[in-house]
Amino acid sequence: MTTMNTSFSVRSIVSFIKESLNSEDKDFTTGNLRKAVFLLAIPMILEMCMESVFALVDIFFVGKLGALATATVGLTESMLTIIYSLGFGISMATTAMVARRIGEKNTKDAAKAGAQSILIAIVLSLIISVVGFFFSKDLLYLMGATKEIAEYGYTYTTIMLVGNIVIMLLFLLNGIFRGAGNAAIAMKSLWVANICNIILCPILIHYYGITGAAVATTIGRGIGVIYQLRQLLKGKGLIQLHLQYFKPQITIIKSLLNVTITATMQFIIASASWIAMARIMTSFGNNAIAGYTIAIRLIVFFILPAFGLSNAAATLVGQNLGANQPERAAKSVWKVAKYNAIYMGFVSLLFLFGAEYFVRFITHEPLVIKTAVLALRVITLGYIFYGIGMVMMNAFNGAGDSRTPTIINFFWFWIFQIPVAYFVAIKLNWGEMGIYLSIVITESFVTLTSMYLFKKGKWKLVKI
């Protein structure tokens, strides 16, 4: 009897996982809420796991080229956070609008919102490409790069900035799929992109050094975008793009931009603090920059699955508000927050006891290892807060209320974290430890503030 029950249980789990990975748009405004969370969460977590691999693969192979290459990637990634911010902003605005229209059972307007968001992304990416083509070396100097780093790595920076369209669209198109409840396609597009990168990265780095890493990454993401567009143009889901939907529609563009601007600012404000941390870290030399870069990549590797789980909150909130079910939306957020906190608690233990093992997997330079291990062990102390906080932020964004998390980020990151980090690290001479502690304290306050405002419930009244 026990064997039969176990067999049935295993079959049920396998069946459930298969259902979550089906490339179908899903309506999450009815049915079991826990099941809805996991139907979204499984592909979203797997999607972000692959994005984690993407980040780690690059730094793994680039790390073999030495501290100069690693530092170049770190400084360039700090600049790319502006692009990630724009991609995040447009993607979140699109997810919120598409999910709201799906909840209202209005698939035509959901598709129009997706098409108009693509137009916005193309215009923004062209501007960034021009800037990157002409000023990549100057931007590296602005980030605090030494002449040695700038001369060595500016080609890498140029390629990454000029090819930003693939980053922007990868974010955005997945936002469309998530809003429609089709997290499986979003997952598969990243798997396609990252598998290509994993294959190309070691080959092109072998022949072209750090420049090869940029080419591999851009090509890999580009293939992922082609896969996404194919699904949207020829797929069978609720969202199907048609050429007439790309005719500029001011009302939709204005509505998207209202959310995009604040969502982008929200992410830029948070990202600027990481840029500021990297800039302060340059005061401690190339090895410190390299160690910090490796630590952040490892942190991202383990945080991105949690971010994937938190993305489920945005879709659930958007669809349920569209269906006029705000209480179901709120309950879904607390469920996602609970599961994310459990996961991040596990990651905290992993880094507290295994930080050096993970760092040595990437580099064997003693001074770089020392910096990276210290960063991991200190920053991980706030992981449970990070897990809950990112769910709250995505819940606000899914409701179309990107203004609230933007204000939270502005106060805690710009008014609090950057001045405190500089004062403690430089003026009080705490060095790297001052930077790491400021990160933990700030992220904890961000989470507590967002939880308080979420409970107040004003996000339930937002229209988009």
Image (cartoon, helix red, strand yellow):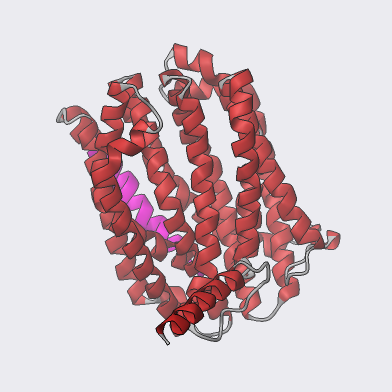
Position of 99 compared to 247: left or right? left
Residue 192 lies, in percent from the top left, at 66, 48
Position of 430 compared to 358: left or right? left
Q: Above or below — where is 442 with respect to 161?
A: below
The residue lying toward the viewer, choosing from 65 and 103, is 65
The residue lying toward the viewer, choosing from 436 and 299, is 299
Residue 282 lies, in percent from the top left, at 34, 24
Residue 301 lies, in percent from the top left, at 43, 46
Answer whether residue 405 is magenta in the image: yes
Number of labels in the image equals 0
Position of 457 compared to 4: left or right? left
Residue 198 lies, in percent from the top left, at 59, 38
Q: Above or below — where is 117 with respect to 363?
A: below
Furthest residue in direction left, as rendered: 428
Position of 371 compared to 181: left or right? left
Query: Residue at image x 63%, y 75%?
Result: 26
Q: Can the viewer see residue 315?
A: no
Answer whether residue 59 is magenta in the image: no
Query: Residue at image x 75%, y 59%?
Result: 231
Query: Residue at image x 45%, y 28%?
Result: 75
Quarter of the image where the C terminus is located: bottom right
Q: Which span of residues is magenta-colored?
A: 398-421
Query: Residue at image x 44%, y 76%?
Result: 332
Q: Main secondary structure of the magenta part?
A: helix
Q: Above or below — where is 382 with respect to 1?
A: above
